[in-house]
Amino acid sequence: MTPFLQAIRTAAREIAAELEKGWRYAYAVKGEVGAGGDRSAGIDRLAEKIYIRHLAPFGAIDSEECGLIGEGEATVVLDPIDGSDNAISGLPYFGSSVALTRNGRTEEGVVVNLANGDCFYKGEEGLLKGSLLHDRFEPVRKRELSTVGIFEKAYAHPDLALALLRRKMKFRSPGAVALSLAYAHNVDFVIFAGPRRTYDFAAALWMCEDLEVVKEEALLIVAKEEETARRLLRMAHAEEG
């Protein structure tokens, strides 16, 4: 286990322990607009503070809430709470996304599901999955016979959503894109509609390099099979009746 992964697991456990003490009104209160363009909630600021304390030794930190702070040869790209509206609403699908980058290249990436403890890590050994509850990590493999995909921000591309429904291609829209990409090896596909922010994708999209990835300005498609990715792209452009 690398020092970077250890630091993130320690910070994530601290955040989870705080949340286990009970929900506080202050966690939901939104303040100023953060570097990512959204108003930062109290839970975002709490998680950011904890992560900064543990990750500052690794270099500069570019966080979705406070922007770029510190200095160093490497940069930590941080989304303290991915799916903060889920967390505020009591929906158990939210986590954190952290990438260690150097010269624009991601070297290590971690996505943590704070709701159930799942922890995805990618480094020199490839993509691994473990848990905040134990220290065992195993290689991630493509899951066979999956029956659903994930369509994040489906409301931003209603035509594609309707095309999927017409073809009985089941999907979910859980509202935490980094987490959804981390689970991409389990599901048939992951679609994201709309502009992409570095904070949400620096770690998680890097974890999908061995999958089929299609990038357009306002559309991202990740699929286990090439034909699935191509079909989804055709449907997005209304080229498949």
Image (cartoon, rainbow, N blue to C red):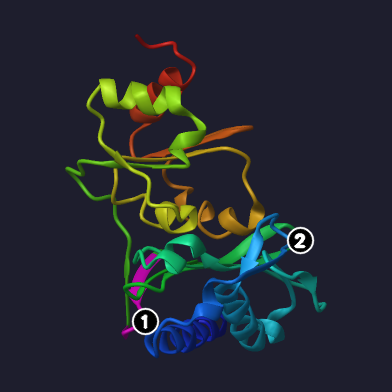
Image: magenta residue range: 128-134
Closer to us: 218 or 127: 218
Q: Give the dominant element type of the magenta stretch: helix, strand or loop.
A: strand
Instruction: Say left or right for 58 vs 171.
Output: right
Residue under pointer 2: 103
The tally of labels here is: 2
Which residue is nearer to you in this view: 119 or 241? 241
> What percent of the width, then of the height, locates residue 177?
48, 52
Circle 2 packing at 10 Å, graded few (<14), some (14-19), many (20+), is few
Mark 1 → mark 2, Cα distance in angstroms: 30 Å
Residue at image coords 65%, 54%: 198
Instruction: Please rate how many residues cluster around mark 1, counting C-alpha atoms within 10 Å: few if below 14, some from 14 to 19, many from 20.
Output: some
> Which quadrant is home to the N terminus?
bottom left
- Image quarter of the C terminus: top left
Q: Nearer the viewer, residue 53 or 108?
A: 53
Q: Which of 175 and 41 is in front in this view?
A: 41
> Where is residue 239 drawn, in percent x and y?
44, 11
Nearest to N terminus: mark 1 or mark 2: 2
Residue 169's place in the image compared with 121, above or below, is above
Residue type indicated by callout 2: Asn
- In screen coordinates, is 76 left or right of 236? right
Name the residue located 34 percent from the left edge and 29 percent from the top edge: 228
Residue marked by disc 1? 132
| Residue 3, horizontal then vertical, whole percent | 55, 85
Give the secondary structure at mark 2.
loop
Magenta stretch: residue 133 in it? yes
Which of pointers 1 and 2 indicates the residue nearer the eye? 1
- Residue furthest toward the left? 145
Residue at (70%, 86%) from the top-left corner? 57
